[in-house]
Image (tube, rainbow, N blue to C red):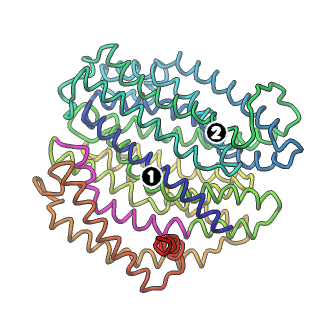
Amino acid sequence: MASGIGRASALLASGTIVSRILGFVKLWVLAQVIGLIGQSTDAFAVANQLPNTVYVIIAGGVLTAVLVPQIVRSALHDDGGSAYINKLLTLALVILFATTAAATILAPVLTPIWGGKLPPEALSLAIAFAYWCLPQIFFYGLYTVLSEVLNARKVFGPSTWVPVLNNVVAIAGLVVFAVLFGFDPTGLERQAGDFTPAMIAVLAGSATLGVVVQAVVLFAFWRRIGLKYRPDFRWRGVGLGAAGRMASWTFGMLLLTTLAGIVETQVASSASGGNDASVQVLNTAWLIFMLPHSVITVSIATAYFTRMSEHASIGKLDLVRTDASSAIRGTTLIITLASAVITVCAYPFAAVFVYRSFDQVAATGNVIIAYMLGLIAFCVLFVLQRTFYALSDTRTPFFFTLFQVTIVVIGVWACLLLPVEWIAAGIALVVTIGGIAQAVLAAFLLRKKLGGIDGKRIAISLGKYLVAAIPSVVIGIVLLVALGGTHEGGFAVSGAVTAMLSMVIIGLAMSAAYFGMLILMRTPELRVVLDPVLARIRRS
């Protein structure tokens, strides 16, 4: 069973790694085409995050929270769950189509909710971008439904590999834009009012086309699990009412997180239009933050989630507890190292995207550091939340999310009191503090629900990881200073190539120190990482 989880996690991670690499290529190309700081890039950032936000409010987390447990249970039906899946997909498509149509029509109303503090020309550009971007809602939903059905049937690969196509299409669109309209890596040569309808269509339309391809391609894999989609509008009598009751709590939770997101974007956009970090810098730093989470935590937890749902469906809570503990200890072993490396390399990482001045490198790097301080807690929270979902409990996550959102909303509004150059970093730090508090509360509540969460074993493992990270961080900082990563003109921050080379050097040295310490401490979880590597070496 453990080897099965390992293989599934490896397959998920491999696709995610390729997708994330291409995602950063896309981000780098975007920075060359319209810049990382400036009115037009903030306008595109607001518009392109709108479909994600609206989708998540309406269906995203609801589908994720209830779909896998419901489909696992439906597999016990005489037809293996085919009828249920057809009904569920039909219902989802109807909801998604109606939502997408309404959101696109309401683009002039929705966009100011998030970008209301943008300068007037930038807000007008954001609305124009939004008309092209909002149709993504339907296809994000389609992708989620199809991939969750495949995951529930333990076909994990396609849903992690098709985002590669999304990135390829989006990168191609950016290249076409650059060929037709030129590059603007500073974000100053083209102001928001300089964008023509053709420029808007190419930039935003190619982003949407990538999402369309990502969703539609998944249909090709349904035959592998013996499913054929036939629209079915007879939704009564298949347990959708229970799913709906679960979804209502998740819907409320998503409204809370959306409220926090609106406040964050509004406050961040107050710094837009100048030379300071704003919306797009926050988005870029968040993508960097999410890189190790997506590759490591999501890959492992997604494989465990199906198994936890199976164990919960037959009342084996002791096995659910074991699964959750294994997932937390396995993910945090690598996440601790990733958190340390990216924190130390924050300035070189920023230099990959920012070219105008060291002040902008430092501003972007500070936002990355502020987010990375909460990475371990964020990944632990992800596993804890999925454990509640496996137990068909979406009510409890609502309350610990309410706790976190309250902290974030109050803290982010307070960031308006900061000097404008520190607003973005302040927002990131507030999000980190709120996430840590949320993880602690979630662990306490899950412990009460399960009668324990293997807390002592988890604490001992986390303690070892943090101790092992100390010499790793010291070595990393010494190398960063030696490579000139803390001052203008230094080798590590003088350009994209030197920055990436410096990150490789620092990362390898820190990794060697970290794993060396874990070996000296005879950390048992390390075998989860080393055994597959050693087995492959022996076979070669």
Left or right of 77 in this view: 221: left
Residue at x 20% of width, y 69% of height: 479
Looking at the image, which is closer to me, 458 or 490? 490
x and y, in percent, of residue 139 in the image: 57, 29
The residue beneath circle 1 is 17
Based on the picture, tell me whether residue 162 belongs to the magenta stretch.
no
Label 1 amino acid? Ile
Left or right of 374 in this view: 365: left
Query: Where is the N terminus found, in terms of image quarters?
Result: bottom right
Q: For the magenta stretch, what is the residue range?
A: 329-355
The residue beneath circle 2 is 221
533 lies above or below 496: below
Where disc 1 sits, the SS reads helix
Residue at x 49% of width, y 40% of height: 163
x and y, in percent, of residue 352 in the image: 25, 48
Q: Residue furthest front?
A: 540
Label 2 amino acid? Phe
Q: Is residue 332 visible?
A: yes
91 lies above or below 308: above
Q: Chief secondary structure of the magenta span?
A: helix
Q: Is residue 462 visible?
A: no
Based on the picture, tell me whether residue 330 belongs to the magenta stretch.
yes
